[in-house]
Image (spheres, rainbow, N blue to C red):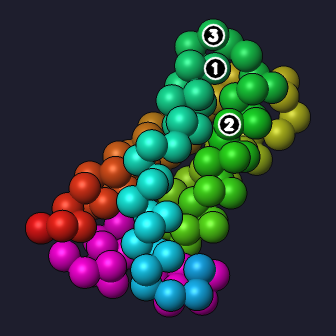
Amino acid sequence: MTLEECYDKLHGNYAEAKTRLMNDRLVDKFLRRFPTDPTMQELKSHVESGNIQEQFRAAHTLKGVAANLALSQLQQDASALTEQLRSCTEQADPELLKKVEESYQLAIDTIGQLDS
């Protein structure tokens, strides 16, 4: 699978990623590092512990990481969760969290297919 095919499959924006990161080598390098980023696990952990401020921080960080890599669907879903959590007065909405988890898993699964 090529980088462009990968971005198509995970509902990302390859052209934007290439513009941000300057070339295919850097897009490939940072995209392959994404599965090791701890932010999604941190988000889940903070949801389990009920720490709303940290839920917001993790959702916001995930949104930024997704934006930097032009993972458009994940960015959109993480942005919706970030905005829901912005006031830090209520726990993460389960439906919004589910969308983030689904977009994240799609990204992880698709990135894992890059060498095939």
The x and y percentages for residue 81 are 65, 44
Task: Using a 10 Å C-alpha cutoff, classify the residue at mark 3 as few (fewer than 14 neighbours), some (14 to 19) or many (20 or more).
Answer: few
Give the image quarter of residue 39. top right
What's under tag 1, amino acid-wise?
His
Disc 1 on helix, strand or loop?
helix
Q: Give the mark nearer the N terminus: 1 vs 2.
A: 1
Mark 1 — residue? 46
Q: Would residue 114 appear left or right of 71 to someone viewing this image?
A: left
Q: Nearer the viewer, residue 2 or 62?
A: 2
Q: Tell me what residue is drawn at x 35 percent, y 66 percent.
A: 10
Task: Using a 10 Å C-alpha cutoff, classify the residue at mark 1 as few (fewer than 14 neighbours), some (14 to 19) or many (20 or more).
Answer: many
Does residue 19 belong to the magenta stretch?
yes
Q: Nearer the viewer, residue 102 or 95?
A: 102
Task: Using a 10 Å C-alpha cutoff, classify the residue at mark 2 as few (fewer than 14 neighbours), some (14 to 19) or many (20 or more).
Answer: many
Q: Are marks 1 and 2 in contact (CB under 8 Å)?
A: yes
Vertical side of 15 occupied by 40: above or below = above
Q: Give the mark nearer the N terminus: 2 vs 3.
A: 3
Quadrant in which the C terminus appears:
bottom left
Q: CA distance from mark 3 to mark 1?
A: 5 Å
Mark 2 — residue? 58
Mark 3 — residue? 49
Vertical side of 27 occupied by 41: above or below = above
The x and y percentages for residue 59 are 66, 41
